[in-house]
Every structure is written in structure tokens, then in C-alpha cells.
Amino acid sequence: MAWAQPDDFEICHLNDITACESVGYLIKYDSVHGTWRPSVTVEGNNVIITEGERSLTIPYSKCETLTEGSNVIMREGERSLTVPDSKCETLTELDYTGLGITMVLECTGTFLDRKALAPYFEKGIKKVVVSAPVKDADPVLNIVIGCNDNLYNPEVDHIVTAASCTTNCLAPVVKVIHEQLGIERGCITTIHNLTNTQTLVDAPNNKKSDLRRARSGLVNLAPTSTGSATAIALIFPDLKGKLNGLAVRVPLTNASITDMVFNVKKETTSEEVNELLKTASETYLKGILGYEVLPLVSTDYVNDARSSIVDAACTQVIDKCMVKIYAWYDNEYGYSQRLVDLAAIVASKM
């Protein structure tokens, strides 16, 4: 996604814990999202991708903590980009000297508080955008595009997070229902695809607080936690303590659905709820919130760049004040698009 926006982003460096060959291979091939359009080859420690007439070569860092000669080169047609790649496992190992890096997208899921992220700034990085909720006594701004991105202050917010995929699914719907009908309280269940925090077959799992993740993700439905509902309070502070929920991990690879139930202050009907959501999807939340009347299923939402797509046929209202809504989301592609959107906002104000 960032590659498709060369006027907004210059990709300077990649860091991973695997071999350069694996980086190139996984850039090209994806079991869910398919084969990437450009040609991708590996020459020695270089992964080469070409596109168009644009050509950009970024010198490889000579730092000894980086794997020597490990450059990721992106090319499609006549457009080319060489990106230094390293496999440092701690932030203190990284050396960005001379690479011209001003912003990092931190996507390891490992460094999730201000102290853990501090080494980036010690190395001259100006902004860090994190692809997971950051938990810290000094709160980090959680941004859900379309809901509260106007709160970003470049003078103060040097670390920002794009929250989670499920929070990005939930928040646009909450915004519409809360602003139009008033949410008193609610509960959500997200039916979420398996992730790497689970095991393929039964095996010990490091997450001792959730032993179900030690069971095979291929054959089980596994209830687990989700912080998405409580995280909504970081987006809509007046809903603190009024929303909660759970997740159920299912043996599918992508495209999830969230079941949302709200008690609302104003009496309403399913028709009115759908009209409110439809209007939002066509106006102030266009491209973020979707609205679908066709009887689609999960695979129909793979590679959907929207954060949340309402399944209109499933909307229900019980006794005028209890609202039930289903919303689909590609928990990988849609979230990645929002992460790039957030990075673009941060970059535009640097």
C-alpha cells in the first residue's frame, strides 16, 4: 500500500528476524491475498521488484549489526526501489545512521509501551506509528481513521497507534450509533480468524493467561479475549466502562465479523439504523465504513480496504432500544490500509 504511494512514502529500511530470501518470498506470495503483481526475484541477498519508470536506490547501511548485503529491492516495469533489510531482534541493535529515516512503522507486536519504544528516538527517529495498541501509564494516542484522526498533534504525539483491526471495525459503527441514537451500554463478540498467537496443532503456548491458544487453531472454535470494546473508550471517552466483549477464534485464514449489541437512548427501528449507517458509508465515513445488502460471506470481504462493512440484512432492533449489528472486516488488508493512512497523516505534518 505504501509502495503504491511513491509521492507520500520513501521506503528506506526493513527489519525482520528472518533471512532476506524469506522477506522477498513473502512480499511476492501470500496464501490469503494472492500473488503480488510485480515481478520479485532474489539475487544473492537482494530481493528485486520493479515498477514503472520511477527508479530509487537507497544505499545499504554498513552497520555491523545489520546483515551484510541484505537489501530488499522492489521493482515493477521500470520503477525500482532498493531497501536495506536487517534482522535485528532488539531496538538497541538497529543503526539508522545515514539512511534518512524519519518515521518507523513498528509492526513486531513486541514493543508496546513508551519505554520499549524509546530507543527509536535515541537513534534519531522522529515519529513511530505502532500497529497494535500501546499500553502505558502516559497514554499514547489511539487513532481510528474516520473517528478521531483530527486529534493528532505533531508537536506532542511522537508515538501513535492505529489501535487494532477489531477496534477499527467497531469504532465507525459506534460513531454512527452513538452520535445519532446515543449508546447507553453494549457488548460485542468478534468472530476472528486464527493468528500466529495460536498453534497449528496442540502445543505449549507462551500465553499462560489464555490456555485455549495452546489448542490447534485448525480444528477448534476458541473463545478468547479482545480489548477492542474497552479500547473504544480511548476513542470515545464518554463510553468508558460501558462497552465490553469477547472474541472467538475460528479456523479460517482471513475476513472476520463483529457482532455488536447496543442499548440506545432513543427509540429506533432496524430500518432507521440501516439508513443511518448507509448514509454514513456514502458521506462522512465513505471509504471507511461500508454498507452491504447482498447476502455475502467471509471470503467476499478478503482484500476489502474498508475498516468495517455493515451486513444490512442482519440488523435487528429489539423492543425499540436494543440494536444488533453485524459488520465484516478484512482483519489484515483493511487494517493495513488504515495503518498506511495514519502514516500518511503523520508524514504530512512532519
Image (tube, rainbow, N blue to C red):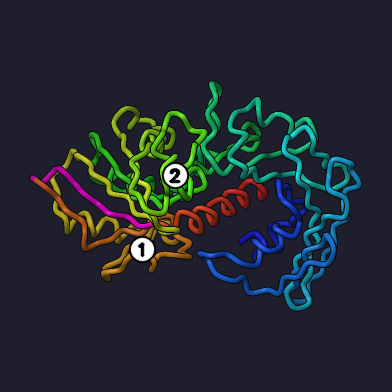
Residue 340 in view of the camera: yes
* In magenta stretch: residue 140: no
| Furthest residue in direction right, as rendered | 62
Q: How crowded is mark 2: few (under 14 residues within 10 Å), some or many (20 or more)?
A: some
Q: Is mark 2 on a helix, strand or loop?
A: loop
Callout 1 crowding tier (Cα within 10 Å): few <14, some 14–19, many ≥20: some
Question: Residue 254, image x and y in percent?
Answer: 44, 59
Out of 218 and 47, give the one closest to the viewer: 218
| Whole-percent x, y for residue 275 in the image | 24, 59
Nearest the eye: 82 or 340: 82
Q: In this view, does 265 lie to the left or right of 102?
A: left
Q: Name the residue under label 2.
A: 202
- Give the quarter of the figure containing the N terminus: bottom right
Identify the residue position indicated by label 1 in the image.
298
Q: Is residue 214 above or below residue 20?
A: above
Label 1 – label 2 distance at C-alpha: 26 Å
Q: Quadrant of residue 73?
A: bottom right
Sequence-earlier tag: 1 or 2: 2
Furthest residue in direction top, as rendered: 137
The spot of residue 324 in percent (x, y) is: 21, 49
Q: Nearer the viewer, residue 307 or 348?
A: 307
Quadrant of image for the C terminus: top right
Tell me which residue sits at (44%, 65%) in the image. Answer: 302
Which residue is drawn at the image coordinates 63% and 27% (left, top)? 114
Helix, strand or loop under label 1: helix
Q: Report the span colored magenta.
A: 319-328
Name the residue at the left extreme.
319
Looking at the image, residue 260 sits to the left or right of residue 64; the answer is: left
Instruction: Name the magenta segment's main secondary structure.
Output: strand
Q: Can residue 284 be seen in this view?
A: no
